Image (spheres, grey):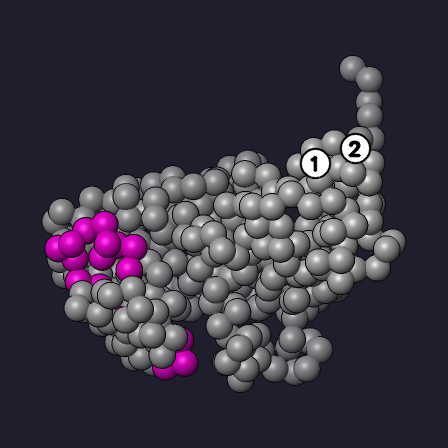
Amino acid sequence: MTLSPARIMEVGMGFWPAKVLLSAVEIDLFTTLGDRALTGAELQQALCLHARANPDFFDSLVALRFLERDGDGPAGRYRNTPETAAFLDRSSPRFMGGFLEMSNARLYQFWGGLTDGLRTGEPQNELKHSGTSMFVELYRKPERLEQFMDAMAGISAGNFQAFADTFDFSRYGTLCDVGGATGQLSMLVARKHPHMTCVSADLPEATRIAARRIAAAGLSDRVSARPIDFFADPLPKADVITMGMILHDWNLEKKRGLIRAAYEALPDGGAFVVIENLIDDARRENAFGLMMSLNMLIEFGEAFDFTGADFTGWCRDAGFTRFEIIHLAGPASAGVAYK
């Protein structure tokens, strides 16, 4: 076999295509195109870009398969691909660009400190630069908090919908989503299963946003938003307790504490569900889950992602007796522990 450095170069220079895409989202290129096809000159003018951007920036997006182009040269017309039209145009109900916006505004620069994080075990985010934690910064700026919540909603929508579609809710009547943010998971479950009553529990600033969105969705009769500090207050009683992308935010002691709190809030036969990018047990395949764990180092230092076997072991120690892992979409799975 002839050795090639191609894969090394592809990954080592991976920040090039990443920043091309992130900048395109930042300047609203995909939304500006919408369902139109524009020449480079028209797109440059619409986006208020310097002439140097045309055609290199747009053609880079073509080569990366984030844009399509009809024709060559100055007369060529750029348009969205089916994927960018669905997921990166703000007018689409499946828009998930909020996560990329947040990544561009925050994570891109903070990941430059990964080497320091590996050497020190310390966060490389706002805490390093301003002395305050990520959550303090987010909750101090309402517009930044809503941007962060929209970002999480964008990347979680497919996983939450897959959970609502896959999990057997026939035996249950109530659900509490702990750390529910915008109330997205609760609303998806309520829409799919009309017999379910759901509570989205989070800090007061988040539940104000959730209550507004629940009302706008016309689901206030079966979905409510309840303020809670889940490290200080008992969790609301429910047949099913969910935590979507919550458990990985914390160190092992706090993970175990949240699992015990869920166990205490559930009835016999109840289910505790975490939706995470669960790492495969052999830690060889789920690269996204492993890099998400590195992202937790960047964000929190001692926080980390985990395998399905890790989750099962912690839940067994808390008293749960039956377990399953349900693959959802892409790198994400639901870990389920039954009381």
Q: Is mark 2 on a helix, strand or loop?
A: loop
The picture places residue 274, in percent across and down from the top left corner, at: 36, 54
- Position of 18 relative to 304 (above/below): above
* Closest to the observer, 292 or 53: 53
Q: Evaluate if marks 2 and 1 touch, with contact meaning CB atoms under 8 Å apart.
A: yes
Residue 201 lies in the magenta stretch: yes
Quadrant in which residue 221 is drawn: bottom left
Which residue in the protein does label 1 denote? 69
- Position of 207 relative to 324 (above/below): below
The picture places residue 270, in percent across and down from the top left corner, at: 18, 55
Q: Residue at x 39, y 68 (%)?
A: 181
Q: Give the range drawn in magenta.
A: 187-206
The picture places residue 250, in percent across and down from the top left corner, at: 48, 66
Q: Residue at x 83, y 45 (%)?
A: 56
Q: How crowded is mark 1: few (under 14 residues within 10 Å), some or many (20 or more)?
A: many
Residue 192 lies in the magenta stretch: yes
* Closest to the observer, 246 or 92: 92
| Outermost right residue | 52
* Closest to the observer, 70 or 204: 70
Instruction: Please give the count of numbered marks on the rendered protein.
Output: 2
* Callout 2 amino acid: Asp
Whether residue 14 can be seen here: no
Q: What element carries label 1?
A: strand
Which residue in the protein does label 2 denote? 72
Q: Residues within 10 Å of mark 2 (few under 14, many from 20)?
A: few
Whether residue 333 can be seen here: yes
Quadrant in which residue 111 is drawn: bottom right
For the C terminus, the quadrant is: bottom left
- In the image, is 140 to the left or to the right of 224? right
* Callout 1 amino acid: Arg
